Image: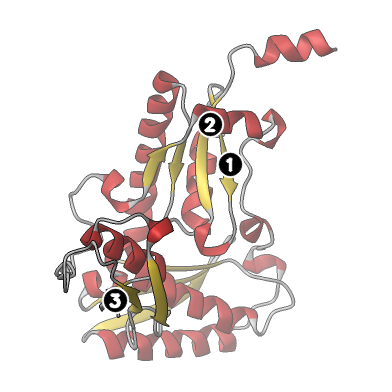
Amino acid sequence: MSPVSEFEGKTVENAVEKACEALNISKEKLKYNVISYGSSGIFGLVGVKKAKIRVIVPESAPESPKPPEPVFEKERPALSDSDDEDEFEIEEECADLDHAHDESEEHTADSSDEDEVSPNQVQVSEEIMDMCRAVLQRVADAITDDASVSVSKTEEYVCFEIAGGNSAVLIGKRGQTLEAIQYLAEKIINKHTARRVRIRVDIEGYLNKRKDRLESLAKRLAEKVKVSGKPSTIGQMNAHDRRIIHIALKDDIEVRTQSIGEGFYRKLVIFPKKKNAKKKAKEKK
C-alpha cells in the first residue's frame, strides 16, 4: 500500500502547491483527498483554520516526505515603509489578453460603488448613527485599550473615526481588520435605510495615506505598462481600493483600467491602449 502524507495551507490550492513542491510532482499526477477546506474565521481574527489534504505518495517519491516548515509572518503596522507593490499581487499578463476586451469597456468601475448614495440623499437618524458608534466602540475595546470612536456626517459619507489605542492592530495587515470593521458598520447603518449609504471608517488618517500610496502605485504601474506594452494585474484589493485606481488613471489617454472576475477573485487590470485604435475607428466610419 502506498504511504500517505498530510499537507496544510491557507486554501486547498495552497496545500496542493506545497505537496507538489515537497514531492517534486506535478498537480496533474498528484492524488489527494481533502480533509478540511479551512475557514477564514470571524473577520479573519478568531477561529481561523487551515485547509488540509491527505496525499497518496507515489512509490518513486522519497519515503515520508517532510512538508515544508510553516513560515509565520509577524504582524506589522499597515503603514510600513515597505514598497507599495509588496502589498498586492501584481503580475504582467500575456499581451493577447488585451485583444479579449473592447476599448469601450475602459475605466469600468465596480458596481458596488455605483449603487451607493450620499447620506444627504437618504435619511440617516442620529439615533442609528450613535447605535452603530456604540457597536464599533465595543469592537475596538475588544481589540485594544484606550481607543475611542466618534461619528459625523458629511455630504458624501457617514464617517466613523477611531482614535487612540494600538492603531496597527486595529488596521491589521493590509488593512484587513479595518475593512472588517467597515463592513460591520455598513451592515448596521444600511439595515435601517431604504438605499445603500456610503460609510467611511478611518483610523488615525489611514485612508488618506492609503489613497496617496494607491495613486502613486497606479501611476508607476501605468508607466510600466506603457513601456512594456503588456497589461498588469493587481489582486488582493477591495472595491474601494479598485475605485481609487480607476479614478487615478481615468484621464490617462495611454492606458485603460478594468475590473474582471467575481467576488474574492476580482482583480483590476491596467491595459495599454493601442496606438492605432483611433485610426482604425476612423477607418470603420
The residue at which mark 3 appears reads as 2
- Residue 131 location (% of width, % of height): 51, 90
Q: Residues within 10 Å of mark 2 (few under 14, many from 20)?
A: many
Label 3 secondary element: loop
Image quadrant where one finds the N terminus: bottom left
> What residue type is disc 2 on?
Phe
Is residue 275 positioned above or below 226 on the image? above
- Residue 61 location (% of width, % of height): 22, 63
Left or right of residue 138, residue 281 in this image: right
Image quadrant where one finds the C terminus: top right
The residue lying at 48 percent from left, 73 percent from top is 152
Left or right of residue 215, residue 101 in this image: right
Residue 118 or 29: which is nearer the viewer?
29
**Image depth: mark 3 or mark 1 in front:** 3
Residue 163 or 274: which is nearer the viewer?
274
N-terminal of the two: label 1 or label 2?
Answer: 1
N-terminal of the two: label 3 or label 1?
Answer: 3
The residue lying at 61 percent from left, 38 percent from top is 107
Give how far apart the Cα atoms at labels 1 and 2 are.
8 Å
- Residue 255 location (% of width, % of height): 53, 27
Label 2 secondary element: strand
Q: Residues within 10 Å of mark 3 (few under 14, many from 20)?
A: few
Give how far apart the Cα atoms at labels 2 and 3 are.
49 Å
The residue lying at 36 percent from left, 39 percent from top is 217
The residue at which mark 2 appears reads as 271
**Image depth: mark 2 or mark 3 in front:** 3
> What residue type is disc 1 on?
Gln
The residue at which mark 1 appears reads as 258
Asked whether residue 202 is in view, the answer is no
